[in-house]
Image (cartoon, rainbow, N blue to C red):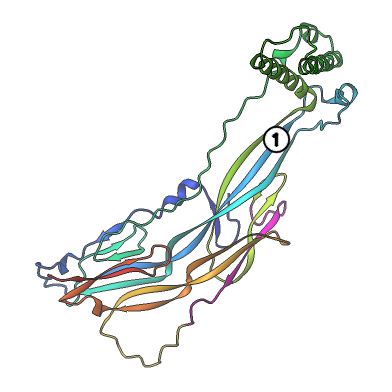
Amino acid sequence: MRTSAPGATISPLSRLAGLAGRLCLAATAMLWGMPPASAQSTESTDYYLPQTVMQFTVKVEKTTYTPGKFAPYAGRYLKKTVNQDAAITYRLIGMDMTPASQPDTARHFNLFIDKKRSIFKVCRADNGQLLAINTDVRPAPVSLPTFTPAPQTPPLNPNDFMSEDILNAGSAAKMAELTAKEIYDIRDSRNQLSRGQADFMPKDGAQLRIMMANLDRQEQALTQLFEGVTTQDTAWTTINFLPTREGQEVLFRFSKRFGLVDADDLSGEPYYIEVTDLHSVAAPEPSPIEKKEDKNDIGLRVVQPGKIRANITDGVKTINSYELLAPQFGTVSSMSGELFGKKQSAKIIFDTLTGSVKTIETIPVE
């Protein structure tokens, strides 16, 4: 499907594992025991900080109704009013949300490495996101809900249960009349079995259950000629939404006749996402106009993510509410290059989703 909202895209489940993989870059000129290259005393590695994407799994049930061959005669012979027109309807049955990360192109930095810093390995994801320094890290895979469709039972074939008289009838009206009579005979036989009044009673309970099940199948097959056949199927669709600001916008639209439709398709009723910044992180202090150069600034940045709330509504009531950490609503700060000295250094692992420091460990330099 096409874009359902500004910053929101609909994609197949198979595309949502693309954040896995890694690329660990070794700053070989800085490896201990190897002298730095004489032609270049400083190297750099570019990287991105992450931003959070909300991955919604929208579950929709599709109901298909096919009228029976004898639907026009249902009122006359079975005293039932049935729909004589085929119909397809959709129903929204649930929604899940899984947070994932992607590179924030507005937060692109360079990590500078010189002979004074004991940085011998920089580990990035294959999308350029910074994962770790001085160690290897495998990014956490995004685990989306998986849908396993239930096995579909094929509908019964009414012709397999029709008598010779029904099949040889000269008109649809006569076939409907004889079929209705057969249905009433089946019901009468079942009632006699349940009361113990049948001419040929089963010998035990197991045989009784088999006979009753066969009568049920016969009635179901013949009744569907009047009442029609209704089948149901469930589909899961993934919608990606990137929250960038507070406010409300259309996440998707839903139609009972067409299911999920694009955000600009007015055949569907809108479902909104309302993002609220919970201001869990203090706003950064303004930088002085004449800021002195920090000799220990090597371009290493870390995020303190902010917390947001996202409410999903249909314009009247709230369907779901989520709270999550989002780096794009947080602040970026600098980590000092003093962490990577000549005598002792640091091993840092960053949180894949938020860009914050997950673990930091002092390591000796040999």
Q: Total number of numbered labels?
A: 1
| Magenta-colored span | 262-283
Magenta-span inclusion, residue 185: no
Task: Say which of 344 and 315 sits in front.
Answer: 344
On the rendered structure, is 1 left or right of 27? right
Residue at x 60% of width, y 30% of height: 152
Residue at x 62% of width, y 50% of height: 94
Q: Residue 135 placed where, x, y %?
A: 25, 63
- The answer to whether residue 89 is seen in the rendering is yes
- Find disc 1 in the rendering and name its residue: 64
- The answer to whether residue 42 is seen in the rendering is no
**Outermost residue to the right:** 76
Magenta-span inclusion, residue 276: yes
Residue at x 9% of width, y 70% of height: 35
In the rendered view, tell whether residue 256 sits above or below residue 228. below
Q: Residues within 10 Å of mark 1 (few under 14, many from 20)?
A: some
**Secondary structure of residue under mark 1:** strand
Residue at x 77% of width, y 22% of height: 223
Q: Residue 114 placed where, x, y %?
A: 19, 75
Give the position of the C terminus as an image quadrant: bottom left
Give amino acid for label 1.
Thr
Q: Residue 20 placed where, x, y %?
A: 37, 53
